[in-house]
């Protein structure tokens, strides 16, 4: 595969990242452009590690990475990437004594967002976008968990980034804020590349044109949400009796069992039930390694 080094999006070839002897990313090839791409996978699959490599927060152990056409291994390119990218880490940490406005202004200074007036306008815009304008004078330590998450999002949105990397962005948001978030990201994705790591299937269904399923540091599915569901057809069953050990299944309200049959295997109880139309959640569970032991 040749490398796409155009100035938009992300291009990755053979990306490996190890922590000591543990391989968190085991050879990833990717090209990402405008729109929202959902990064799915169970705990430990490598999602955060991949986002951190793209965000210039972690160096690759092997392979090649280009972000907005730049090479994160070069100091000048790294600075340029950081200026043009927004990153919401999994557990954003803030200076607790800063006010909401003060903190965002500080980030805006680091991002070199214009002169004082222009910068303050941008900070106000970011606060309004995440509905924190009324709390602009509040100290960070006095915000609720969901408000802190929104503050992290506002900081990622500063300067209308060309690339937005969001690690589990809707954790702790109430339903109203979650809908607001979707609206905002969907609007941004019309012109920017957005990568969203999440366990929230509803967010994937609402936002993502493309999904990547990671399992043990590899991409095991790359396609649209509809294609993910199609691939699960014939692999989701409902049956009256409890399935055999070792198969992922759960009891439904009517006492029947929903059973997931992984690719390459057959339902051992096929006479006890019938295949049913898979949901996106079924497909997600099937292609992110449900039922196997965590590493
Ligand atoms: N700083 C670290 N030091 C050592 N190992 C790490 C470190 N960060 C992650 N790992 C390991 O790398 C693997 C991938 O972790 P990563 O955080 O990328 O997964 P994830 O898909 O984001 O998981 P989650 O859904 O739980 O956030 C895991 O096996 C994890 O234990």
Image (cartoon, grey):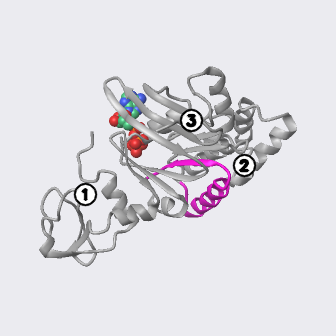
Near-viewer residue (128 or 141): 128
Residue at the spot of label 1: 263
- At mark 2, the secondary structure is helix
Is 254 displayed left or right of 241 in the figure?
right
Mark 3: which secondary structure?
Answer: loop
Instruction: Please tell me how crowded label 2 is: few (under 14), some (14-19), or many (20+) other residues with Cα within 10 Å.
Output: many
Q: Nearer the viewer, residue 164 or 1?
A: 1
Instruction: Say which mark, if any, is on residue 93.
Output: 3
> Marks 1 and 3, Cα distance to the nearest angstrom?
40 Å
Query: Which dot, 1 or 2, sits closer to the camera?
Result: 1
Q: In the rendered structure, are the residues bearing label 1 and label 2 in contact, judged by CB atoms less than 8 Å apart?
A: no
Residue 97, x across and y down, in percent: 66, 33
Which one is earlier in the sequence, the residue at label 2 or at label 3? 3
Which residues are drawn in magenta?
Answer: 173-199
Residue 179 appears at what percent x and percent y? 59, 63
Name the residue furthest top: 75
Q: Residue at x 24, y 58 (%)?
A: 262
Residue at 56% over, 35% down: 93
Please state the quadrant of the image where ligand 1 appears.
top left
Q: Earlier in the sequence, mark 1 or mark 3?
A: 3
- When the figure is inspected, residue 246 is found, relative to residue 239, above or below; the finding is above
State the SS at label 1.
loop
* Residue at numbered disc 2: 127
Q: Dot 3 surroundings within 10 Å: few (below 14), some, or many (20 or more)?
A: few
């Amino acid at each position: 595969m040749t490398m796409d080094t155009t100035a938009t999006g992300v291009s990755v070839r053979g990306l490996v990242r190890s922590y000591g002897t543990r391989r968190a990313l085991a050879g990833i090839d990717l090209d990402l452009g405008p729109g929202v791409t959902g990064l799915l996978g169970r705990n430990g699959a490598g999602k955060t590690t991949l986002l951190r490599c793209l965000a210039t927060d972690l160096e690759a152990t092997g392979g090649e990475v280009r972000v907005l056409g730049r090479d994160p291994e070069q100091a000048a390119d790294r600075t340029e990437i950081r200026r043009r990218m927004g990153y919401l880490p999994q557990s954003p940490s803030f200076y607790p004594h800063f006010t909401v406005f003060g903190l965002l202004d500080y980030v805006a200074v680091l991002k070199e967002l214009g002169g004082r007036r222009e910068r303050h306008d941008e900070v106000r815009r970011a606060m309004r976008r995440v509905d924190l304008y009324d709390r602009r004078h509040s100290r960070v330590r006095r915000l609720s968990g969901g408000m802190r998450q929104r503050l992290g999002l506002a900081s990622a949105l500063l300067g209308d980034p060309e690339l937005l990397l969001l690690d589990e962005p809707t954790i702790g948001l109430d339903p109203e804020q979650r809908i607001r978030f979707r609206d905002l990201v969907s609007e941004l994705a019309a012109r920017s590349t957005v990568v969203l790591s999440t366990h929230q299937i509803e967010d994937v269904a609402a936002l993502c044109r493309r999904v990547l399923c990671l399992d043990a540091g590899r991409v095991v599915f790359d396609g649209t949400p509809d294609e993910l569901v199609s691939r699960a057809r014939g692999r989701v069953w409902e049956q009256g009796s409890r399935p055999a050990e070792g198969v992922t299944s759960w009891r439904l309200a009517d006492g029947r069992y929903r059973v997931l049959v992984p690719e390459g295997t057959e339902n051992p109880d096929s006479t006890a039930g019938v295949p049913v139309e898979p949901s996106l959640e079924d497909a997600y569970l099937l292609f992110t390694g449900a039922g196997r032991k965590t590493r």
